[in-house]
Image (cartoon, rainbow, N blue to C red):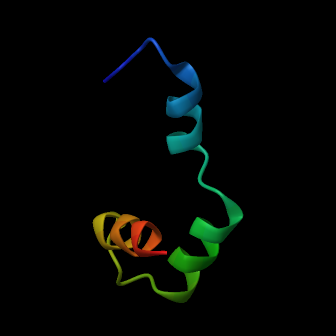
Amino acid sequence: MLKKEPDKELEIHQPTITEIEHTTIHPDISEKERKETADSR
């Protein structure tokens, strides 16, 4: 992975509240699908 931008790694390791809520509400949805949904918005 890119080590030039540690900020991106922190964001990945610490999901936002929205991501946590999505995981809690839709645990069956995989990370890939969640990312695609976020991109759609």
Q: Is residue 8 above or below residue 41?
A: above
Report the residue that reaches farthest toward the right: 17
Report the residue that reaches farthest toward the front: 41
Q: Residue at x 34, y 69 (%)?
A: 36
Q: Indicate the position of residue 41 as horizontal and vertical percent values.
A: 49, 75
When asked about the image quadrant of residue 10, the answer is top right
Report the residue that reaches farthest toward the top: 4
Q: Is residue 37 above or below residue 39?
A: below
Q: Indicate the position of residue 8 as horizontal and vertical percent values.
A: 52, 32
Check the picture and name the quadrant holding the N terminus: top left
Q: Residue at x 70, y 65 (%)?
A: 17
Asked if residue 29 lies left or right of residue 5, the reply is left
Q: Residue at x 54, y 20 (%)?
A: 6
Asked if residue 5 lies left or right of residue 1, the reply is right
Asked if residue 21 lies left or right of residue 6, the reply is right
Q: Is residue 38 above or below residue 2?
A: below
When asked about the image quadrant of residue 35, the answer is bottom left
Q: Residue at x 55, y 78 (%)?
A: 22
Number of numbered tags placed on the structure image: 0
